[in-house]
Image (tube, rainbow, N blue to C red):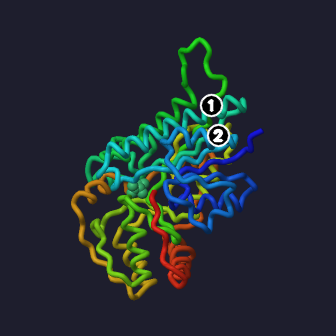
């Protein structure tokens, strides 16, 4: 008899770190971690097993499911937007083919159990592609508006949202015998995330966490977007809270499969001001990189997350002031007093 478990892909990334802690604090789920890199040793005791390898390695995935019956999959592994622009073909393989393989695995696991596997998928504000700055400044964007991404990562995420919806609602819809059990696909679109524990790698919203961590270390930092650039952000505790709240929501409360979530929108200049006031040794300049700026300029200044608030009572705990005052500044200060942050792959 296989042991029931929750699988986290991309477990050593910044969301993975928080999620492992959040899941293990919340219940006694058996957590199985999978990542290309070996899991941070602090997190290993919280997991029943941690596998090093790729979601594209079919043999490895078979090995995992031969041992564990997966009840839930948090599929976090992905190449972020900046990295994906350097290797778009690889990004498509990992972000799309990898997600497809996992959806199929979820389908098979669900049919053995006669109960759908919950498939939790983080998407991103990168699915948006606003045509100009006037539209970007035009207010809170709804889930279905301006979904014309200009990056490979944005295209990948948008398509996988659709793929998840297909596997949940229409899989083999014309077959004589339709699948009795499909996949309980649930997706949230994250804004830029900021963690006190880890530094992301390969994202285009990374200027915010990079600025904060460099400021805390009193290292000079050249911000790669203009001072007036605004996108929505969320501190890591709320990102984990949102993922767990969506995972726990009773299915009858969910009116959609893809939800926007956000906490606060700040300009890069406002982030710089907060960093300088918390860490007087910070030295931050603005040296916009035209190509990365162009990507951020297509992402909305704010998103409409009314559906998440209504359906599963999403409310962020940290706003622009408390994210810095109660979480980032104290936690990052403690961390650098002890040791540098761990760079992460997603
Ligand atoms: N953080 C992501 C990126 O910059 C966007 O959601 O790629």
Residue at which label 2 appears: 65
Residue at which label 1 appears: 108
Residue at the far top in the pictured view: 176
Question: Taking 285 as reference, is 13 above or below it?
Answer: above
**Rendered location of residue 238, percent (x, y):** 57, 61
Question: Taking 330 as reference, is 15 above or below it?
Answer: above
**Rendered location of residue 296, percent (x, y):** 32, 57
**Rendered location of residue 187, percent (x, y):** 54, 44
Whichever of callouts 2 and 1 sits on the residue coming sooner in the sequence is 2
Is residue 339 shown left or right of residue 113? left
Residue 157 in view of the camera: no
Going 54% across and 20% down the picture, which residue do you hit?
172
Going 40% across and 88% down the picture, which residue do you hit?
280
Which quarter of the rendering shows the C terminus? bottom left
Q: Is mark 1 within 8 Å of ligand 1?
A: no
Which quarter of the rendering shows the N terminus? top right
Q: Secondary structure at mark 2?
A: helix
């Amino acid at each position: 008899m296989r042991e029931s478990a929750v699988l986290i892909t991309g477990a050593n990334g910044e969301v993975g770190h928080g999620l492992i802690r959040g899941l293990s604090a919340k219940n006694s789920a058996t957590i199985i971690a999978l990542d290309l890199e070996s899991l941070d040793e602090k997190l290993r005791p919280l997991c029943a097993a941690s596998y090093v390898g790729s979601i594209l390695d079919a043999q490895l995935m078979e090995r995992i499911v031969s041992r564990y019956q997966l009840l839930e999959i948090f599929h976090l592994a992905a190449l972020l937007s900046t990295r994906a622009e350097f290797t778009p073909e690889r990004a498509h393989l990992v972000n799309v083919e990898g997600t497809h393989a996992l959806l199929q695995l979820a389908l098979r696991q669900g049919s053995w159990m006669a109960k759908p596997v919950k498939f939790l998928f983080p998407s991103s504000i990168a699915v948006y592609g606003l045509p100009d700055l006037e539209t970007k400044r035009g207010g809170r964007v709804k889930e279905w508006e301006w979904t014309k991404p200009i990056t490979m990562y944005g295209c990948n995420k948008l398509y996988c949202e659709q793929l998840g919806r297909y596997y949940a609602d229409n899989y083999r819809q014309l077959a004589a015998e339709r699948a009795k059990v499909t996949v309980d696909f649930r997706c949230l679109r994250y804004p830029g995330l900021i963690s006190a524990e880890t530094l992301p790698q390969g994202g285009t919203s990374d200027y915010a966490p990079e600025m904060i961590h460099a400021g805390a270390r009193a290292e000079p930092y050249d911000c790669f977007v203009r001072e007036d650039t605004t996108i929505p952000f969320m501190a890591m505790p709320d990102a984990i809270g949102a993922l767990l709240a969506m995972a726990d929501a009773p299915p009858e409360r969910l009116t959609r499969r893809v939800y926007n979530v956000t906490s606060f929108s700040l300009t890069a200049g406002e982030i710089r001001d907060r960093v300088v006031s918390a860490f007087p040794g910070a030295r931050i300049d603005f040296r916009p990189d035209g190509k990365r700026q162009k990507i951020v300029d297509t992402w909305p200044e704010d998103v409409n997350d009314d559906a998440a608030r209504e359906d599963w009572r999403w409310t962020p705990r940290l706003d622009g002031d408390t994210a810095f005052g109660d979480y980032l500044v104290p936690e990052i200060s403690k961390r650098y007093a002890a040791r540098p942050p761990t760079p992460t792959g997603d």
